Image (spheres, helix red, strand yellow):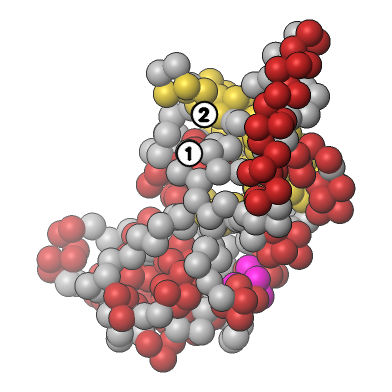
Amino acid sequence: MTDTTIAPGTGSAPAPGTPLLEARGVIMRFGGLTAVNNVDLTVNTGEIIGLIGPNGAGKTTFFNCLTGLYIPTEGQVTYKGTVLPPKPFKVTQAGMARTFQNIRLFHNMSVLENVLVGRHTRTKEGIVSAILRGPGYRREEADSREKAMALLEFTGLARKASHLARNLPYGEQRKLEIARALASEPGLLLLDEPTAGMNPQETRATEELVFAIRDRGIAVLVIEHDMRFIFNLCDRVAVLVQGEKLVEGTSEVVQADERVIAAYLGTPYEAAPGSTADAGSGADAGSRADADSGSASDAEGTIPEEDEQ
């Protein structure tokens, strides 16, 4: 992996360890369904933060609230102290970029062209300049190509710059999505299940890539179901269960929390999100635990693969 000189974000970089992204009291309702319920999260500069939880916990919905795809019903999201507008392109322009759970590349465009698309928030020439192809346009185009090629070198895809995106192996398509996100020069990169469907070698390569991104001064917030990947990678991990944040802390703290284990196995526990406060419902809880015991033993050691909401 070759080092390049792509500068993260725009403007002056905050001091290491200062708050970069702050979400406060984020609630997202769809009709009568509360998909995200009063979630707080802070990402500091230089950090890699993990977001985990069972299927349907609200992880991707929360991501969508952070990046402007959804407008939160309640709560506030700020980046570098400024409230983010509820428009994805403005969020990207502010300095946040993301990838998606399902790969969203331009399959009939080349690898290089896909990365160039990610430069659109950092170019200044307009449609008239593009039509006339004046000196300013040509300089900017050359600069964008140089930076895009540097990112392809960084992600190990430079030799396939002219290939169609659809012809790349699955793991390299994931890398290309990351390269395209980096082309917007973010200060914070959000990754939604970047290792989904990967073999162990590809997962390890992705882990090394994320560390290299962090080493370049870009903070990372990542959703993932691969627990080994998350716990090896992250400085802090937050756990969502039924739309609520259950616990947040270091990998060691989260792994040792019995509530996290219970949430993944489907076992009821005291003060679980969505549970009633009626102490007299112990018999009902016991019957639910009995009903879940078979599926819990089958589920042990496995992690669900998708989280649409």
Are there few (<14), some (14-19), or many (20+) residues within 10 Å of tag 2? many
The quadrant of the image that shows the N terminus is bottom right
Which residue is under mark 1? 309
Question: Helix or strand or loop: what does disc 1 sit on?
Answer: loop
| Residue drawn at 86 percent across, 53 percent down | 252
| Residue drawn at 70 percent across, 57 percent down | 301
| Relative side of 129 to 192, left or right | left
Q: Which one is in front, 202 or 276?
A: 276
Q: Which one is in front, 15 or 290?
A: 290
Residue 50 visible in the displayed image: no
Q: Which residues are magenta?
A: 205-210
| Residue drawn at 72 percent across, 35 percent down | 267
| Relative side of 2 to 86, left or right | right
The location of residue 155, given as percent across then percent down, is 52, 79
**Magenta stretch encompasses residue 206:** yes
The answer to whether the residues at label 1 and label 2 have Cβ atoms under 8 Å apart is yes
